[in-house]
Amino acid sequence: MSYQVLARKWRPRTFHELVGQEHVSRALVNALDQGRLHHAYLFTGTRGVGKTTLARILAKCLNCRQGVTSVPCGECETCREIDEGRFVDLIEVDAASRTKVEDTRELLDNVQYAPTQGRYKVYLIDEVHMLSTHSFNALLKTLEEPPPHVKFLLATTDPQKLPVTVLSRCLQFTLKNMPPERVVGHLTHILEAESVAFDEQALWLLGKAAEGSMRDALSLTDQAIAFGQGEVRHADVAAMLGTLDHRHLLALAEALAEVDAARVLQEVASLAEQGPDFGAILDDLAGVFHRLTIAQMVPDALDNGHGDRDTLLPLAARFTAEDVQLYYQIALQGRGDMESAPDPRTALEMTLLRMLAFRPQGVPKPPQTPLPIRGSAENQAPAAAPSSAPAAETAPSQPSSPEIQAPAAGKGSEDVPLEAKVPETKVPETKLPETKLPEVEAPPVVEEAPPSMADAPDDAVDAALEDEAQRQADAAGVADVDDAPPWALDDVPAPAASESPAASESPAAVPESPAMDAAAEVDEPDPEPTTSAPVAATHEAGAFDHARWLAVFESLALGGLTRNLAAHCIIEHDDGETLMLRLDPSQEAMLADVHVERLAKALADQGVERRLNVTVAALPENLDTPRSQSERQARERHAQAVEALRRDPHIQMLEHDFGAHLLERSVTPTDGAASDA
């Protein structure tokens, strides 16, 4: 007996043997069981999903010798003849080869005659969308009101080409594409029945290559059995299909996880030796990123399509969620850019390097030489005079304007004189009353010197005056001094026109400065430090408790998703070696080892060297996380700012006289904490 291909040998003969089209088989089975039969059925779907098979099963159900049933016997003469394709009352028409209107009229001339052997005369018209417009017009009347012994079964892969008049006269059933999981399951059943040795990974390659068609999958399986000498093995199927070994893609993903550009290029060079389709490599790599995202978000939903589930789960923990999302987007964008690239390999390499260059945390940057600070010793005017020299000789002269005294730099600037004459500077756009402020003694030497005003006299005086004007604006609840009304700056001092000669006779005397006097008069709390300092230097040695966690959180210099996770944690326990943290359950999906490692490194940089153990549990209501503390403080600052504005007499005057209203949502606190928030 000649060999019969798998696609024909394993063609379903009943509705219960049909694979993957339960929604269609259920409707037809119920209609047959209840006797609610339509005169015309239209089956649509891509190639190889069972359209013709469904039509033949339905014809068998209608003409079985045991009666109209949803379960034909398969043993009577009618069932055998339909299975063998020689039943006289099943007229199969290939519309692709019979498109003329004369062919359709010849077909319809025989519709009126009763069936020869069966109960119904069934017309199966395949690829019906290929009929001409005249053929459809000739078919319409008969299709709408055929004789009671006639059933029309139409099949097409392109229902959009059918006239609406034909669609409205049929019951339409759309068949689904076969997902790889369904194809692999069916192939496993067939190969076990055929006693053919196989690898599951090879079946997944066949299922993906079939692209939704079960017939194509069976045809490829026949080819794979012949290629592998009676076996279906992964290496043979990959060679037959010309697909890339999945292990190369995983190696490329590992190189990206390590942020190792040299290894990435090495892996691409190794792939290039096999002469692959570089566009297909990028497509497959995007598929790997998709599965990594599933492994991060819903690990239980990750399939074992390539037999790599145990490899992908730990690999997913080495990426952050934002990294994988960005890499996936860059892969899709790079796939579209390949057409305009010099060559496909260059496009692939540039796409992979772009992933590393634009990852959220950024690649390490080369060290940069800091720019010199204005007012430092290196930028001082040449041949600076000693402190005992007259003031007129220690500062650059401005013959066109009078001179005033300004303080000089302290410690850290050896060649800068303690006294320097700077030209008088006028505050633009603001007329300020001149106010003589009392003299204050020179402050002690500080560890970090301010910039010398001898080098930039205009800027120094301007900065001092602007600082005082900004303080006045802050007290009035105005965020920017340029937006302040004139009455809000009534107390801003004007620059001194000149100092008395006695003030510059003694080298130890420090001249008056508006900025220094204002600093002496305004007692403000020190702003929070912006630079990180080790915890050991600011806290007593001992356990790292939750209070210290809240105190040092801003100095950890965390960013991105790692900062977000840490901001939702509280400290549970510290035994000196292991630090126990509890995470809000709302952030559990983003918890990854990479974030724990970054947080441990940030704490170690602050002097808290611990192993971190993060558990997910509900947080107590009496403890603030860094996030909730920041939000609470922001609300308090906003409430204080609103209250200060409501007490302001000018605001009250505007509300009383002009009916103004204060928009509380537009109020922004201007203190340092508010700006940090």
Image: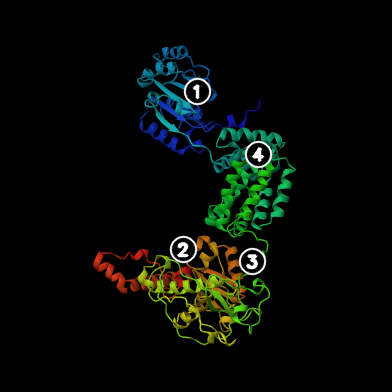
Q: Residue at x 61, y 53 (%)?
A: 309
The answer to the question of whether label 3 and label 2 lie on touching residues, with beta carbons closer than 8 A, is: no
Give the labeled residue for mark 4: 195
* Label 1 packing within 10 angstroms: few (<14), some (14-19), many (20+): few
Q: Quadrant of residue 104?
A: top left
Give the labeled residue for mark 3: 371
Q: Amino acid at mark 3?
A: Leu
Dot 3: what SS? loop
Q: Residue at x 39, y 26 (%)?
A: 164
The answer to the question of whether label 4 and label 3 lie on touching residues, with beta carbons closer than 8 A, is: no
Q: Earlier in the sequence, mark 4 or mark 2?
A: 4
Nearer to us: label 4 or label 2: 2
Marks 3/2: CA distance?
A: 44 Å
Give the labeled residue for mark 1: 77
**Residue 162's spot in the image, x, y percent?**
43, 25
Marks 1/3: CA distance?
A: 96 Å
Q: Amino acid at mark 4?
A: Ser
